[in-house]
Amino acid sequence: MTTAPGPTPAAPRETPEAPRAGDFPLIFERSKPGRRAAHPPKPDGESLQALLGAEHLRAAPPKLPEVSELELVRHYTGLAHRQMSIDGNFYPLGSCTMKYNPKVNEEAAKLFAELHPYADPDAVQGALELLYNLQRDLAEITGMDAVTLQPAAGAHGELTGILMIRAFHEHRGEGATRRVVIVPDSAHGTNPATATMVGYEVKEVPTAESGEVDLAAFRAALGPEVAAVMLTNPNTLGIFETNILEIARAAHEVGALLYYDGANANAIVGRARPGDMGFDVVHLNLHKTFTTPHGGGGPGTGPVGVKAHLRDFLPTPIIKKVATPEGERFDVDVDLPHSVGRMRSFYGNFGNLVRAYTYIRALGREGLRGVSSAAVLNANYLRVKLREAGFKIAFDRVNMHEFVAQPPAGVKTLDVAKALLDYGMHPMTVYFPLIVREAMMIEPTETESLETLDAFAAALADILRRAQEDPDALPNAPYTTPVRRLDEVKAARKPVLRYTP
Ligand SMILES: Cc1ncc(COP(=O)(O)O)c(C=O)c1O
């Protein structure tokens, strides 16, 4: 078995006696009455009873696990070693962009850990300056005029953006007539979901043989009832929409606004700007493009940038710089004339904003260009390697930071993905985008070495060979992980999320 970091030689791991999930006890099962990992000081002064009132105190202590500090450390260290993680394993999730998060970002975020979000602006001028600078940097990077840092995920950014688009049309008296949002059939599910949540009808346009939006179908879908067009560029097939200027012109001609889903912005960062392509609104997934952590549903960050005509619709607060007789000062602007209101408490996921700012400052303009170059080069290198290994490439042309492959007939993508775990690698994104049969969506990212890319290609070639030699090999994989194949239906329908003795 290998879970060692770094490149792994391609070799099937055959350990039929794989450990069972139950071999690792729960923290509750390690519990022994009276053991303590922490000894909080006893409150001096008034008793809790006097402070809170006896009716607010528990009648009996909560059922918490009781373990020593060493047992606690061993428990979580043990769990961490059983994980596939970006710090330990290659993690080529297409569209999810799991790249390495530099540790200096963490150091920077720690500097602000003590700040309270209710602190008076005068007491936290440095933090506000950082937010202001980040707003400015993201506006510059995307080619937009103003930015909100509030949204807590890409999908939350989409909601913010489409709410602004709706407010914009309503303000112009077209709220009742513009009822449609256009999305390509390759779009991420969050795009149609967002449009629907905001009350729009979704019109889907097909993908052409080139992998780009079918231009004729797109033109046919346009009309005075269209409020917005939502596009990812490069799209979820990893292909750059070369007709983007034409698409923007056609959308604007009918009075629709163009929304940029920035989940794939790491493919163009430092090189091309959605603002220059004609987009009116853009969200960025800082947790993908600017190395802040994500996974498990958060904590993400999805700032939204807008062109000047949408500035007054931004959610508040926005951080502003004001001139005073004593010099410049940073403050929060809560007073925008047509604001869609507040989208999140306080200033957004502040720690992640610090991480993203650190990343941008550390790399600078040239460094960011380097990110997109390496991301695209790595993906194209792998695309060719996988074609040579016997995989089919959907829309086989020069791609951007990711591409979609398919296993040959008779081999299932799910089996390939599960088998990869035995090589110490996290599987790629599977069965997305929906328009590609048995899709394997692969994004190596720019932080991986040539050796790791070669090891991944070799592992996939080896998996194919095993599948062809022994039809039982893959359906039984993984062989070496602590948990093998889960009952996915049961996990979805009857999840056990809480320990009950
Ligand atoms: C193309 C695309 N759009 C939107 C999203 C949603 O972003 P988030 O997961 O930050 O909500 C994703 C996430 O994977 C994505 O890949």
Image (spheres, rainbow, N blue to C red):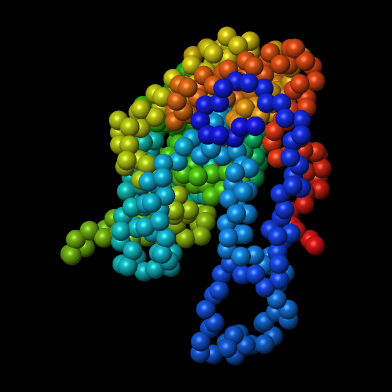
Say left or right for 468 vs 424.
right
State the image quarter where residue 387 is shown: top right
State the image quarter where residue 449 is shown: top left
Compared with residue 402, is residue 117 higher up or lower down, i.e. above or below?
below
Q: How many marks?
A: 0
Quadrant in the picture for the N terminus: top right
Residue in view at x 73 percent, y 81 percent:
59
Q: Position of residue 333 (x, y in %)?
A: 38, 59
Residue in view at x 67 percent, y 87 percent:
54
Q: Position of residue 399 (x, y in %)?
A: 50, 18
Quadrant in the picture for the C terminus: bottom right
Q: Position of residue 223 (x, y in %)?
A: 58, 28
Residue 85 appearing in the image: yes
Residue in view at x 49 percent, y 14 percent:
398
Residue in view at x 74 percent, y 44 percent:
21
Depth check: 326 or 286 in front?
286
Depth check: 139 or 403 in front?
403
Q: Position of residue 284 (x, y in %)?
A: 47, 39
Depth check: 149 or 324 in front?
149
Say left or right for 98 vs 500.
left
